Image (cartoon, coloured by chain):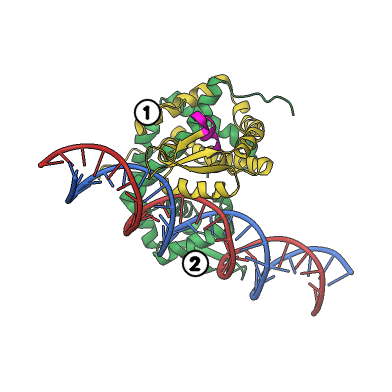
Chain colours: A yellow, B green, C blue, D red
Amino acid sequence: MPEPRWLDDDEFRAWIGYRRMRLLLDAQVNQDLTRESGLSAPDYDVLSALTSSEGHRRRLTELADRMLWSKSRLSRHIGRMEQRGLVAREGCETDARGSVIVLTEQGLRTIQEAAPGHVASVRRHLIDLLSPEQIDVLGTIAETVLARLAPDEDLRR
Amino acid sequence: MPEPRWLDDDEFRAWIGYRRMRLLLDAQVNQDLTRESGLSAPDYDVLSALTSSEGHRRRLTELADRMLWSKSRLSRHIGRMEQRGLVAREGCETDARGSVIVLTEQGLRTIQEAAPGHVASVRRHLIDLLSPEQIDVLGTIAETVLARLAPDEDLRR
DNA sequence: TCACAGTTGTTTACACGTCAACGACATGGG
DNA sequence: CCCATGTCGTTGACGTGTAAACAACTGTGA
């Protein structure tokens, strides 16, 4: 085995920093979200993906692909959200196996009420702490990394 | 409620990019790690924290604080790693309630064998894709965010 | 038309995390 | 010295994620 190229100080700082930031930033933003709206981060992601879909509805598999979730996970999560009245299941007209997930009135109201606080939380803990240049670099880094891992994916959807 | 300041295009790109990167990058690095060494990411973190501790040992609570894990989680995880022979539990001499976690020979060998491949994976999927400037900015962003969320924490330990 | 390989969504079994409660022990003030 | 209060680590109950198996259904090629 060849001697590996270890991380130098700057590289180590970036990698460890990224990992710690991931841990604490996500925990904080998710906690804010849950406290203010009663939604978990996955709840918010599902509602958000549905809100930006035509007719506020989408096939389960499509939704799962878009969110990078397994169908199993999404199916289970939808089941729980259904019981809370946030979404509903409908049969698919063109494919009898299919299941269409629909945003309910209550689901729409819930995410609309949650969104301002959520954005404020993201600003408070990340965006407003950074300069426009830093924000730009962060976006570029993410695009660079994602270009290798998911070449055919579009971030703006 | 005041009208919130929504995210502009660059801010949205950075936030969504960060979230997607988190999802895919971590999944990829963890998958590489597990395939090559049989260790999960949490396993690696525990072994890594123990390796860099004096005597390759540490009190459970100290370890948990340092890793930002709950004591409950660490206790359970140590239980599993203990059964695989990667770590061992010892009683604490100065506090009969206490439990000291020790890296075993096998645990040390395992992480030493895993480290080169892990570093290579981190390089392949992140570090080597970025310019020195981008790496520096990423580190600075992380420090900025963490300074607010965990003011008294030192990243370099 | 029909066999068959593939897809869709659900479910079962399991792994792992959290929260709260717990027993055991430590510690400081009366 | 002793009691009240707090800490340490573990555990039980529970929620939620994964992998694999599954029934139901689709669609394609012979």
Figure check: B10 above or below A39? above
Please check the rendered image and state whether residue B123 is part of the magenta-colored stretch, yes or no.
Answer: no
Q: Nearer the viewer, residue A16 or A118?
A: A118
Q: Say left or right for A36 vs A84.
A: right
Per the image, label 2 sits on a secondary structure element best described as: strand
Disc 2 marks which residue? B89
Per the image, label 1 sits on a secondary structure element best described as: helix
x and y, in percent, of residue A33 in the image: 63, 40
Question: What is the spatial separation of the Cα atoms under label 1 and label 2, in whole angstroms?
Answer: 44 Å
Task: Residue at 52%, 29% (x, y): give it.
Answer: A52
Which secondary structure is most common in the magenta stretch?
helix
- The quarter of the image holding the N terminus of chain B is top right
Q: Which mark is residue B141?
A: none
Q: Residues within 10 Å of mark 2 (few under 14, many from 20)?
A: some
Task: Residue at 40%, 33% (x, y): give it.
Answer: B126
Quadrant of residue D7 within the rendered picture: bottom right
Q: Nearer the viewer, residue A155 or A61?
A: A61
- For the image shown, how many numbered marks are present on the structure? 2
The amino acid sitting under disc 2 is Arg
Q: Nearer the viewer, residue B147 or B12?
A: B12
Disc 1 marks which residue? A147
- The answer to whether residue A103 is visible is yes
Chain ID at mark 1: A
Task: Residue at 42%, 51% (x, y): give it.
Answer: B44
x and y, in percent, of residue A15 in the image: 46, 37
What are the residue bounds of the magenta stretch?
Answer: A47-56
Q: Say left or right for B36 vs B65.
A: left
Q: Say left or right for B134 vs D15.
A: left
The amino acid sitting under disc 1 is Ala
Q: Nearer the viewer, residue A52 or C17?
A: A52
Chain ID at mark 2: B
